[in-house]
């Protein structure tokens, strides 16, 4: 059995717990920048109920709710809280996995003497008592179902999926709720008539019965290989300083590289997309013969693409980094130098997955913080 803990509207809840004035109010946490020109990082449940969600431009959120409370994201505070929750969960002395800054998993297979539901209740109560924020807990035979279960009764939910309610639960749950089905794959399958999780189960029962023990393998071994991986970002305002622009490209390259490695993939093609008032939106790409999964390689190819474009101090408003021609890593690294970098990169990823994305990053990335 896996017990999945998913914090409810984590960043917004932390802000509300710290500042009682924000309690029970519609609130958004924005990424950096002025409050009208940023993107919603997190929305409190009071804001979610109005239709405000993360990823939305803050301007649109304020159109929906002019009295919306606004707080600028404070990563350090969220990472700190996340670490504290991790420490609390460690106290349960069960195999523990840090999935993301606001998600944790416990493997209950070795713990026969405790009822999973009462354990879930205890965890929720301790988190609330210590941090004054709520978590939703999902319990099921494997990672995928436990994560799904945690989403079904949010906020402050506790859901068990077992043999007795498996069919009924999957029948009433939209396929797009399932991890990995939120994007294009979900849309494609929905268009093919697979509306609920049960529809998918009837077609592909093996998708739901993966080995429950090795939960850190996540979905990489059951999901199909993606065509491309990308990250993009819209800056709070036009940026002309090449140092800052390069820092953003570096950060996006790091994020793309980390996702590649999580899925055990390599790339051959890098695509850089830039947009600005004078240059419009355009992209260019570069394909190399050798496969790689190194973020720095992505970054340096982006710089070559930039150099080829020969732009003179362009004004940049948004940028994106995409890798494609993906393949699963099949052969061990051959060159010593690659091996050495491979170990470094692995350590880097471990720290970031343990302490939350962005815990350590190349010094250059800090230039993305120099302007507000
Ligand atoms: Mg969450």
Image (cartoon, rainbow, N blue to C red):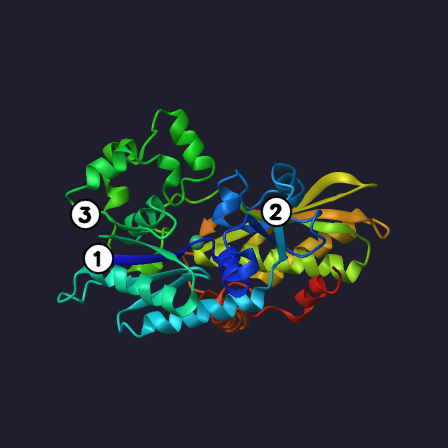
Q: Residues within 10 Å of mark 2 (few under 14, many from 20)?
A: some
Instruction: Estimate the spatial distance between the alpha carbons at disc 3 and disc 2, rounded to whole Å.
Output: 40 Å
Find residue 315 and report its horizontal and vertical position in percent. 81, 49
Give the mark count: 3
Q: Which residue is mark 2?
A: 68
Left or right of 358 on screen, residue 186: left
190 vs 210: above or below: above
Q: Residues within 10 Å of mark 1 (few under 14, many from 20)?
A: some
Q: Residues within 10 Å of mark 3 (few under 14, many from 20)?
A: some
**Location of residue 19 by image quarter:** bottom right
Q: Which residue is mark 3?
A: 162
Q: Residue at x 61, y 51 (%)?
A: 69
Find residue 353 and report its horizontal and vertical position in percent. 46, 65
Name, please, the residue furthest toward the right: 312
Instruction: Estimate the spatial distance between the alpha carbons at disc 1 and disc 3, rounded to whole Å.
Output: 11 Å
The numbered disc on residue 283 is none
Tell me the mark number nearer the camera, choosing from 1 and 2. 2
Any part of residue 204 in sight: no
Any part of residue 352 in sight: yes
| Mark 3 beta carbon near ligand 1 (under 8 Å) | no
Q: Which residue is mark 1?
A: 117
Instruction: Estimate the spatial distance between the alpha carbons at disc 1 and disc 2, rounded to whole Å.
Output: 37 Å
């Amino acid at each position: 059995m896996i017990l999945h803990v998913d914090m409810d509207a984590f960043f917004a809840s932390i802000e509300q717990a710290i500042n009682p004035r924000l309690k029970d109010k519609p609130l958004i946490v924005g990424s950096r920048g002025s409050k009208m020109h940023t993107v919603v990082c997190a929305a409190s449940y009071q804001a979610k109920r109005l239709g405000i969600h993360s990823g939305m431009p803050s301007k649109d959120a304020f159109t929906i709710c002019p009295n919306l409370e606004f707080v600028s994201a404070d990563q350090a505070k969220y990472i700190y809280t996340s670490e504290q929750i991790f420490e609390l969960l460690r106290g349960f002395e069960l195999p523990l996995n840090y999935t993301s800054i606001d998600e944790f998993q416990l493997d209950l297979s070795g713990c026969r003497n405790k009822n999973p539901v009462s354990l879930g209740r205890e965890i929720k109560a301790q988190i609330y008592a210590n941090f004054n924020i709520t978590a939703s807990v999902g319990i099921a035979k494997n990672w995928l179902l436990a994560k799904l279960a945690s989403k079904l009764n949010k906020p402050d939910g506790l859901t068990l999926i077992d043999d007795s309610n498996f069919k009924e639960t999957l029948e009433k749950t939209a396929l797009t709720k399932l991890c990995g089905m939120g994007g294009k794959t979900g849309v494609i399958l929905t268009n093919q008539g697979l509306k609920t999780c049960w529809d998918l189960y009837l077609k592909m029962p093996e998708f739901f019965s993966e080995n429950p023990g090795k939960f850190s393998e996540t979905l990489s071994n059951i999901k199909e290989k993606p065509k491309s991986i990308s990250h993009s970002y819209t800056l709070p305002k036009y940026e002309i300083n090449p140092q800052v622009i390069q820092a953003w490209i570096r950060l996006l390259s790091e994020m793309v590289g980390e996702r590649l490695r999580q899925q055990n993939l390599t790339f051959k093609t890098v695509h850089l997309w830039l947009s600005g008032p004078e240059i419009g939106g355009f992209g260019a790409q570069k394909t190399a013969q050798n496969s790689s999964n190194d973020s720095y390689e992505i970054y340096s190819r982006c710089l070559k693409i930039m150099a080829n474009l020969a732009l003179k101090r362009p004004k940049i408003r948004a940028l994106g980094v995409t890798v494609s021609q993906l393949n699963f890593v099949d052969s061990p690294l051959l060159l010593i130098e690659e091996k050495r970098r491979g170990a470094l990169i692995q350590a880097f990823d471990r720290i970031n997955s343990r302490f939350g994305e962005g815990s350590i990053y190349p010094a250059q990335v800090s230039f993305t913080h120099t302007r507000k």
